[in-house]
Image (cartoon, rainbow, N blue to C red):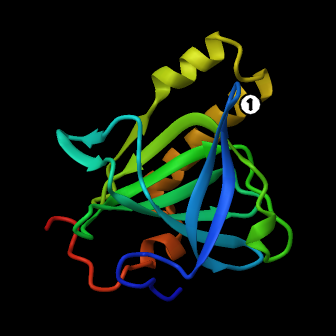
């Protein structure tokens, strides 16, 4: 896949809903970078509720940018996270209900349902599971069905195993580059 422009901004806007049970719905306003029958790539500036730290270093925060890869019928997304100076900090994967859209038309992207569990993968391949506390709280509160709970745990385990083998994130995500970006340790 070709790289995006210098700051990961596409020419076309794409807005879709991101839902977190029981009813939090956020409209995501993104820049569409690429779309095929099986993959949509978007970018946007991040505004997380709290910074993400990995080994004492902030790796994701407000003002950072993400290039997100959505794969049709897959129960996850993967973001390449960049600091405001363009330095890549790692990958962020959300565990989701399967992502769906019609054909290669990204405008038909259905609302994405987040199942709380996330995986941070550092540039060196080490990883950390995130938001397990939020997941357990959602399960205890009855925000997730038994099926969603089992699905989320199974997907996370599969992502961990694939990461340990070096098979995750997918090659298209690993090979993607923003033009003129500094190395991860700049």
Residue lying at the far left in this picture: please name it: 186
Quadrant of the frame with the C terminus = bottom left
The residue closer to the viewer here, 127 or 148, is 148
Label 1 neighbour load within 10 Å: few <14, some 14-19, many 20+? some
| Res 54 → quadrant | top left
Where is residue 43 drawn, in percent x and y?
A: 50, 67
Residue lying at the far top in this picture: please name it: 140
The residue closer to the viewer here, 133 or 32, is 32
Residue matched to label 1:
148
The residue closer to the viewer here, 83 or 76, is 83
Residue lying at the far bottom in this picture: please name it: 2
| Res 105 → quadrant | bottom right
Instruction: Determine whether, in the image, residue 76 is placed left or right of residue 88.
Output: right
Residue at the (77%, 21%) spot, across then down: 146
Where is residue 132 drawn, in percent x and y?
A: 48, 26
| Res 57 → quadrant | top left
Instruction: Give the answer, above or below, for where 48 lies relative to 175.
Output: above
Instruction: Give the answer, above or below, for where 88 lies relative to 179.
Output: above
Instruction: Give the answer, above or below, for where 141 lies relative to 61.
Output: above
The residue closer to the viewer here, 120 or 7, is 7
Dot 1: element: helix
Instruction: Give the answer, above or below, for where 124 lies relative to 36.
Output: above
Residue at the (44%, 52%) spot, across then down: 92
Where is residue 74 drawn, in percent x and y?
A: 71, 56
Instruction: Determine whether, in the image, residue 43 is placed left or right of residue 144.
Output: left
């Amino acid at each position: 896949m070709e790289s995006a422009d210098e700051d990961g901004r596409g020419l076309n806007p794409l807005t879709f809903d991101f839902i977190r049970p029981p009813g939090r719905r956020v409209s995501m306003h993104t820049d569409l970078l690429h779309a095929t029958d099986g993959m949509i790539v978007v970018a946007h500036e991040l505004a997380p509720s709290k910074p993400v730290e990995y080994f004492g270093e902030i790796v994701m925060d407000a003002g950072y940018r993400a290039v997100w890869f959505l794969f049709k019928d897959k129960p996850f997304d993967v973001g390449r996270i960049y600091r405001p100076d363009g330095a890549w900090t790692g990958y962020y994967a959300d565990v989701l209900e399967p992502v769906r859209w019609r054909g290669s038309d990204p405008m038909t992207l259905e609302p994405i349902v987040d199942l709380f569990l996330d995986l941070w993968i550092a540039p060196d391949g080490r990883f950390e599971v995130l938001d397990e506390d939020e997941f357990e709280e959602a399960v205890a509160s009855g925000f997730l069905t038994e099926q969603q709970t089992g699905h989320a745990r199974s997907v996370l385990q599969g992502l961990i195993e694939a990461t340990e083998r070096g098979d995750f994130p997918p090659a298209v995500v690993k090979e993607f580059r923003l033009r003129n970006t500094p190395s991860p340790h700049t």
